[in-house]
Image (cartoon, rainbow, N blue to C red):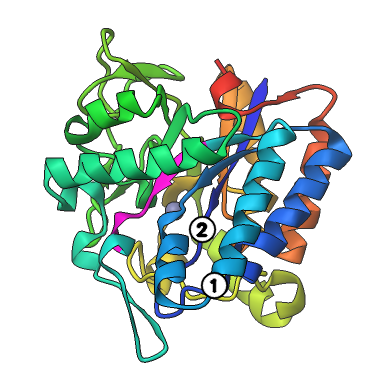
Amino acid sequence: MKIAITWDYELFFGERSGSVEQCMLEPTDRLLELASKYKIPFTFFFFFVCLIKFEEQSDCHQELQRVKTQIQSWDSLGHETGLHIHPHWEKSVWMDGRWQHDLSHYKLSDFSAEEASHIVERYASYMNSILAHPLQSYRAGGWCAQPFTPVAEAMKKAGIRYDSSVFKGGKNTTSPYQYDFTVTPSASHWRFTEDPAVLDSEGAFTEIPIASMNYSPLFFWKLFVLGRLNPKQHKPIGNGVPAKGGGSKKDLLTRSHRLCVSADGYFSTQLNRALRKAQRANEPFMVVIGHPKALTPFGLHTLEAFISQHQRNHEFVTLSSIL
Ligand SMILES: [Zn+2]
């Protein structure tokens, strides 16, 4: 089976966005070391606009340069770079020593079609200007890729052919999120035009969904208890605070949730279960999502064990080479 491990390379969006050093540079360096040790490629969905904002608002030119260097380094090593967009940063302002985010413009569909297309064009052309291997794939911030039509032309122009925003069975319509993947084609991947969750055999784009599965309340009990008992192993390297939304702690501890197969922290303990499930279903591939900012010492160790165990029998690939 082909396995693509993908990372959304970004800061946090909550009360504190965290530092570029701890959310992006440091954990990604560790991932790149891991990749080179096992000679496997990763895919990094890169969101850059926050860095431009940092450059405009405060004295972070050096950080911006280091991020560019890191991207160009992974690009030259054969890792894939994909486009990732959290458009609310367009409206974020620096006030009282921290970023104030306007979550009324959280997703591209909160902007006019013209504004949204302009955002896609601007981000994509910036990224393509620093990459040797141009963009081919896209992942929407917060999985909010519906509807796709308003940005379809801009995506085509940017060279985007693949989307990896959908995870089967996922749904979150709690503001600021808006996605519903409870009904999707049964195939492992499919063509689409207007909505990445709806098949259109003539579509210009191909959806390569992120793998998903159910997580029981017991899983979250363990996650929260272990985090308390051994914070050194389970505390993320990233130092920000996530945005609110996407289920309360109480909700997670009382009912089962359909979520992405993930390499983030304690979620990495479920990678083997996800792989067995994919094999039983005869899936041709498995796409895993992760975030450098959410990487923990424990998660990194578990991920390494997973890669080392399966490297011989499975093929680790980039997203655009999975089909
Ligand atoms: Zn993101």
Q: Secondary structure at mark 1?
A: loop
Seen at 42% across and 35% down, the residue is 138
Q: Is residue 4 left or right of residue 194?
A: right
Q: How many marks?
A: 2
Q: Is residue 45 magenta?
A: no
* Camera-side residue of 88 and 276: 88
> Could you tell me residue 282's position as x and y percent?
58, 16
- Residue that badge 1 annotates: 60
**Left or right: 34 with respect to 99?**
right
Which residue corresponds to mark 2?
Answer: 10
Percent x, y of residue 260:
49, 45
Between circles 1 and 2, the one closer to the viewer is 1
The relative height of residue 257 versus residue 147 in the rendered view (above or below) is below
Mark 2 within 8 Å of ligand 1, using the beta carbon: yes
Q: Which residues are magenta?
A: 82-88
Dividing the image into 4 quarters, which one contains the N terminus?
Answer: top right
Q: Is residue 86 magenta?
A: yes
Q: Quadrant of residue 160?
A: top left
**Residue 204: numbered disc:** none
Taking the image as drawn, is residue 13 in sight?
no
The residue drawn where x is 65% and y is 40% is 273
- Alpha carbon separation for disc pair 1 and 2: 15 Å
Picture quarter containing residue 100? bottom left
